[in-house]
Amino acid sequence: MSLQICQPGILAPLAAVGRSLAFRLKPDAPLQASLCRLRDGFDPDWGVLGFGLPLTRALSSEILGLRAFPALAGPGCSVPSTQQAAWVMLRGEDRGMLFDHSERVLKMLEGSLELDDATDTFRYGAGRDLTGYEDGTENPHGDEARNAACAGGEGPLAESSFAAVQRWAHDLRQFRSFPPERRDHIIGRRASDNEELDSAPETAHVKRTAQESFEPAAFMVRRSMPWATAHQQGLEFIAYTRSLDSFDTMLSRMAGLEDGIVDALFTFSRPLTGGYYWCPLVKDGSLHLRALGL
Ligand code: HEM
C-alpha cells in the first residue's frame, strides 16, 4: 500500500536556518520537464515546496482553493501582493546544507523557472520574533495541527496544504522606543512571561488574530522565521492551512477591512511581499504532482 503524507517540513519544528526562495516563470519554457525533474529529485527532507497560480494556469490545471495573494489597502496601511509561480522553503542545520540544497533545486528548475527572490532566515532563541516575543505559542499541535494545515479526505488534494508567505520588515528602533507596556499592548502578550493580556486594546495583534474568534475558526500552523541583513530585519511570515479562506479573513481583519481597526503590528512593521502556494502531498517519498497533470 502506498504512503501519502503532507510534506514533512510543514509540521516539523523550526530548523536552525532556512532559505525562502521565490521563482518566476520564463516565457515559453519547458516547464513540464523541470517539474518532472523536481518530482523525481526533490527530497522532502530538504524543505517545503509550493506552486502559485501563474504556474498552475500555465499548465492549464486547476487546484481547487488556490488563488492569487490579495493586495489590500486598509485605513493607513497597505498589503502588497508579489505572487510568484513557485516557492521553496529550504531548511537546514547550517548554511552549508542550505547552499547544497539550493544548488540542487536551482539545477532542477533551470531553463523554466528563474529565481526572483531569496531570503535567508534563522531561528531566534527558542522561536522568538526579533521583537523578543515568543512566536507560535497558540499553534495547534499533533492531530489538530495536521487538521489545520493539511486537507483530509480521499480526493486528489488530500494531504496537500496551502502556504501563505509574507515578508514583514520591522522598524525595531521604533518598536524599542515604545515603553514596555505599549509594546505588550501591540502584541497582546506580556514579554516577560508570555501571558496573554485581557486588558490589551482591540488593536493588539493576538486580539485581531484570535483563531477561535472567526466563524468558522481560522486555525493555521505558523512556521515563521526571522530574517536580517546589516540594514533591515523582520519576519518571514509562513502559515500553512487547509484552506486559504482562514488566512484571507484574518489578513483583512488585521488590515482593518472588517471593522476599521488596524492591527497594531503596522505601527512598527510592514509587509513587503505576499504569495499563496499550493504544497502538494508526498507519496512514497516523492512529491505527488498528479493534480498538475504530471
Ligand atoms: C510582523 C509580522 C508578525 C509578527 C511579528 C507576529 C507575531 C506574533 C506573536 C508574537 C504572537 C503571539 C504568540 C503566538 O500565539 O504565536 C502571534 C500570534 C498569532 N499571529 Fe502573528 N505575527 C505577525 C503576523 C501575522 C500574520 C500576517 C498573521 C495572519 C494573517 C498572524 C497570525 C497569528 C495568529 C493566528 C496568532 C495566534 C492568535 C491566537 O489564536 O491567539 N500573524 N503573532
Image (cartoon, rainbow, N blue to C red):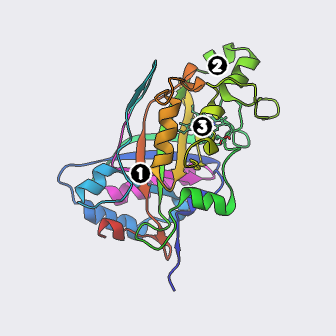
Q: Is residue 22 left or right of residue 149?
A: left
The type of residue carrying mark 3 is Thr
User: How far is mark 1 from mark 3, CA to CA?
Assistant: 21 Å
Q: Which residue is mark 1?
A: 277
Q: Residue furthest bottom?
A: 1
Q: Is residue 202 left or right of residue 280?
A: right
SS for callout 3: helix
In the image, is residue 263 above or below residue 235? above
Residue type pointed to by label 2: Phe
In the image, the residue with mark 1 has its CB under 8 Å from the nearest atom of ligand 1: no
Q: Position of residue 73 (x, y in %)?
A: 40, 25
Residue 95: where, in percent of width, then height?
Answer: 57, 47
Q: Position of residue 115 (x, y in %)?
A: 35, 45
Q: Is residue 93 above or below residue 123?
A: below
Tag 3 near tag 2, CB within 8 Å: no
Q: Nearer the viewer, residue 108 or 55?
A: 55
**Which residue is tagged 3?**
209
Q: Which residues are magenta?
A: 81-110
